[in-house]
Amino acid sequence: MASRTFHFPGFSVEQGDIRVDLNMDRFSRQFQRAQYELDGNVMNSMVPFMPHVNGTFIQTTRAASAALQGAGKVYAAYGPFGRYLYEGKVMVDAQTGKGPRKIPMGPGGDYILRFRKGAKLKKTDRPLDYTRTHNPNVTDHWFDAAKKKDGRKWIEAVKRTAGGG
């Protein structure tokens, strides 16, 4: 008897007189839920290590990550200043050698930093001085700090949700 194979969303193998049908939908849903949960846990774990002056940077990063939650992608730092803050080094315009300008945001004394439009940035050896008022554990490369602190918890939660222990 000739063997035949059929492919469809479940999984089927037919060979001789033996036929096996496996429906993997349940596992797909579990894996998707586990990925969604992992993405959220990673973002939540990073927040205590992220720079926080008025909360805008964290809110923007959280919103961008929420839009991708479940896709296996999390923004560690979003927006035009994300890379600057994440690297933890003072950056300058590669062409002019100048740092960003302070632009006042309002009467509260808040300001934003802006480079000239189209500036290519390069790191210096000088570390950024983060404000520690809201997040005393702020550090550069906060994903790594969050992973070191909560990585085991992330794995346990994924295993639990995905059905692996």
Image (cartoon, rainbow, N blue to C red):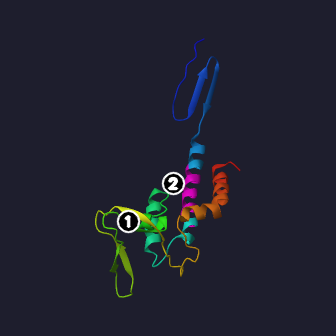
Per the picture, the main secondary structure of the magenta-coloured stretch is helix
Front-most of 99 and 15? Answer: 99
Q: Are marks 2 and 1 in contact (CB under 8 Å)?
A: no
Who comes first in sequence, dot 2 or dot 1? 2
The residue type indicated by label 2 comes to Gly
Query: Quick check: 80 left or right of 137?
Result: left
Query: Quick check: 161 left or right of 101?
Result: right
Specify few, some or many for label 2: CA neighbours under 10 Å numbering under 14, 14-19, or 20 or more.
some
**Which disc, if any, is residue 80?**
1
Front-most of 162 and 98? Answer: 98
Against 16, residue 58 (above or below) is: below
| Number of numbered callouts drawn | 2
Most extreme residue toward the top is 1
Question: Percent x, y for residue 39?
Answer: 54, 58
**Is 4 part of what is drawn in magenta?**
no
**Residue interval drawn in magenta:** 32-44
Q: Quadrant of the N terminus?
A: top right
Q: Residue at x 48, y 64 (%)?
A: 87
Residue picked out by circle 2: 70
